[in-house]
Image (cartoon, rainbow, N blue to C red):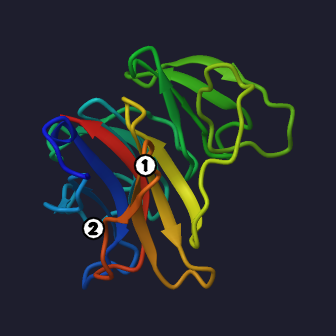
């Protein structure tokens, strides 16, 4: 049920906390297939690297690799970790982000030291538009088709966090954790059958923010 020829076009990228001898604040980006197999660390760098967005075979991620601890900027890379490019020259918040126009425009949250509004930018990092929310705090932006539809999606024993739909709408990847937050997993829901499968094991405590890649 979780493996067929069409599903092989998808990978799931997600964030993993991997403490090591170099840094105790080392977050890596992993990928895996929809059946949970072939897990790979595609960043392999002693930085803080978090992905909150993918488009086709590109992973967009924030990282402090060129600065100091947790001063993050936006980067993109291929699904296998190659061709890393820095996008923004302004600092970002640790925040979800969204895309539109086939991934050519992104909506991001700049760090509060930079600005108090949301930015729509292009893939070069140019600011195309600033959005004033009128609220004292705004973060985790994404684009909505019409802003009207909302309903309860899931019903299971876990608490839930970051999540992403597959481009064809057949799969929902979701971050799952217990009430004490002792273990974070990536789960996959078959939207037709509503079957949930846990794709990760307990090798790492923090496994979060899944996004879909097309390869």
| Image position of 101 (left or right of 156) | left
| Image position of 48 (left or right of 117) | left
Residue 139: x percent and y percent? 67, 44
Q: Is residue 146 above or below residue 175?
A: above
| Image position of 5 (left or right of 183) | left
Marks 2/1 in contact by CB < 8 Å: the verdict is no
Pointer 2 or 1: first along the chain: 2
Image quadrant assignment for residue 14 = bottom left
- Number of residues whose C-alpha sits closer than 10 Å to that of mark 2, classed few (under 14), some (14–19) or many (20 or more): some
Task: Name the disc covering residue 21, or none.
Answer: none
Give the mark toward the camera: 2 or 1. 1
Q: Is residue 55 above or below residue 188?
A: above
- Number of residues whose C-alpha sits closer than 10 Å to that of mark 1, classed few (under 14), some (14–19) or many (20 or more): few
Residue at image position (36%, 63%) is: 197
Residue at image position (60%, 39%) is: 110
Image quadrant assignment for residue 32 = bottom left
Residue 153: x percent and y percent? 61, 48
Q: CA distance from mark 2 to mark 1?
A: 40 Å
- Name the residue beneath numbered marker 2: 46
Residue 20: x percent and y percent? 27, 82
Judge by depth and name the residue closer to the eye, 100 or 107: 100
Judge by depth and name the residue closer to the eye, 19 or 100: 100
Residue at image position (86%, 39%) is: 135
- Name the residue beneath numbered marker 1: 193
Among all residues in the image, which is located at the extreme front? 193
Judge by depth and name the residue closer to the eye, 110 or 14: 14
Q: Secondary structure at mark 1?
A: loop
């Amino acid at each position: 049920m979780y493996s067929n020829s069409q599903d092989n076009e998808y990978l799931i990228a997600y964030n993993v906390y991997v403490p090591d001898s170099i840094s105790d604040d080392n977050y890596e980006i992993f990928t895996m297939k929809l059946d949970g197999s072939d897990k790979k660390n595609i960043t392999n760098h002693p930085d803080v690297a978090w992905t909150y967005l993918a488009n086709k075979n590109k992973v967009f991620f924030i990282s402090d690799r060129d600065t100091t601890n947790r001063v993050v900027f936006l980067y993109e890379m291929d699904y296998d970790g190659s061709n890393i490019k820095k996008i923004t020259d302004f600092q970002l918040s640790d925040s979800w982000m969204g895309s539109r126009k086939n991934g050519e425009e992104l909506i991001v949250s700049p760090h509060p030291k930079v600005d108090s509004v949301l930015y729509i930018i292009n893939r070069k990092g140019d600011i195309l538009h600033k959005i004033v929310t009128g609220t004292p705090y705004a973060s985790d932006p994404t684009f909505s088709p019409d802003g009207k539809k909302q309903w309860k999606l899931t019903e299971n024993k876990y608490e839930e966090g970051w999540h992403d739909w597959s481009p064809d709408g057949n799969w929902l990847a979701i971050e799952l954790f217990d009430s004490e937050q002792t273990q974070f997993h990536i789960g996959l829901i078959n939207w037709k059958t509503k079957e949930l499968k846990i794709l990760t094991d307990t090798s790492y405590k923090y496994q979060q923010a899944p996004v879909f890649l097309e390869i």
